[in-house]
Structures are given as structure tokens and as C-alpha cells.
Image (tube, rainbow, N blue to C red):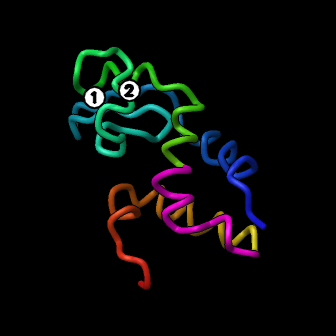
């Protein structure tokens, strides 16, 4: 069985620290950007919005929570009996960004 605790370090190894990309006008930390974060839950600086300043304050633990809630659990990866298939699926949807969340089940 696949386990998020074993998979998350693999993903985070390739996701760097804080990036503020002027071309896309987005900020990232550990592969997370404001679009992926739940309303208010990651307002790390307490100013009422989620922006680049909050992204800078994300921890690896926060990134694992986002990965687990929005990708791992969404695709029920812990129910997939073959570890490598679960990890490939979640890696694909993580790399797909928003589309990994909104693509309906069954595709």
C-alpha cells in the first residue's frame, strides 16, 4: 500500500524554496501557490489574504498537508495497492496543478 509519509519527501525533494516568478505573476514554495491553498487556512501572516508573503511562510509540513488534502486524498491514493502506481498518479496530478484537482473522477 502507498503511504503519503513515504511519498511526500520524494515530491518535496524536487520542489524548491520560495520563488516569485514575474513572468507568471505567481509565487511558489514547495510547489504550492495561493491558487492551491484553502481560503484562510494558510493565511500565515494573518492579514486576511493569501499572497506571496504567506507563501514565503509555508513550511514543509504545510506543503505535505496541501499535497495530502488536495491530491493524495482526492485521488484515494492510500487505497491503491501498488505503491508505484499511486505515486505516479499523485505525482502527475501534483504536476498538473489546478487540473489535478478539478478533473472529475473516472477519466
Q: Relative to 22, is 31 above or below? A: below
Residue, disc 1: 50
Residue at 40% x, 63% y: name it: 100
Q: Is residue 81 above or below residue 14?
A: below
Q: Which residue is drawn at 41% across and 21% down?
A: 56
Q: How crowded is mark 2: few (under 14 residues within 10 Å), some or many (20 or more)?
A: many
- Left or right? Give the position of 16 relative to 87: left
Is residue 71 inside the magenta stretch?
A: yes
Q: In this view, does 88 lie above or below 59?
A: below
Instruction: Name the quadrant containing residue 41.
Output: top left
Q: Tag 1, which secondary structure?
A: loop
Give the magenta-colored segment's residue range.
68-81
The location of residue 31, given as percent across then percent down, is: 46, 41
The x and y percentages for residue 107 are 41, 84
Q: Image quadrant of residue 55? A: top left
Q: What residue lies at 42% left-to-right and 78% top-to-bottom? A: 105
Q: Mark 2 points at which residue?
A: 55
Q: In which quarter of the image is the N terminus?
A: bottom right
Q: What element carries label 2?
A: helix
User: CB atoms at circles 2 and 1 under 8 Å apart?
Assistant: yes
Depth check: 25 or 99 in front? 99
Q: Which of marks 2 and 1 is nearer the N terminus?
A: 1
Q: Residues within 10 Å of mark 1 (few under 14, many from 20)?
A: many
Reply yes or no: does residue 26 show up in magenta.
no
Amino acid at each position: 500500500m502507498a503511504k503519503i509519509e513515504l511519498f511526500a519527501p520524494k515530491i518535496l525533494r524536487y520542489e524548491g524554496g520560495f520563488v516569485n516568478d514575474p513572468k507568471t505573476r505567481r509565487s511558489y514554495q514547495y510547489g504550492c501557490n495561493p491558487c492551491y491553498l484553502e481560503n484562510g487556512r494558510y493565511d500565515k501572516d494573518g492579514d486576511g489574504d493569501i499572497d506571496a508573503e504567506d507563501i514565503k511562510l509555508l513550511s514543509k509540513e504545510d506543503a505535505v498537508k496541501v499535497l495530502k488534502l488536495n491530491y493524495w486524498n482526492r485521488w484515494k491514493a492510500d487505497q491503491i495497492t501498488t505503491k508505484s502506481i499511486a505515486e505516479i498518479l499523485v505525482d502527475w496530478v501534483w504536476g498538473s496543478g489546478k487540473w489535478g484537482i478539478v478533473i472529475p473522477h473516472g477519466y
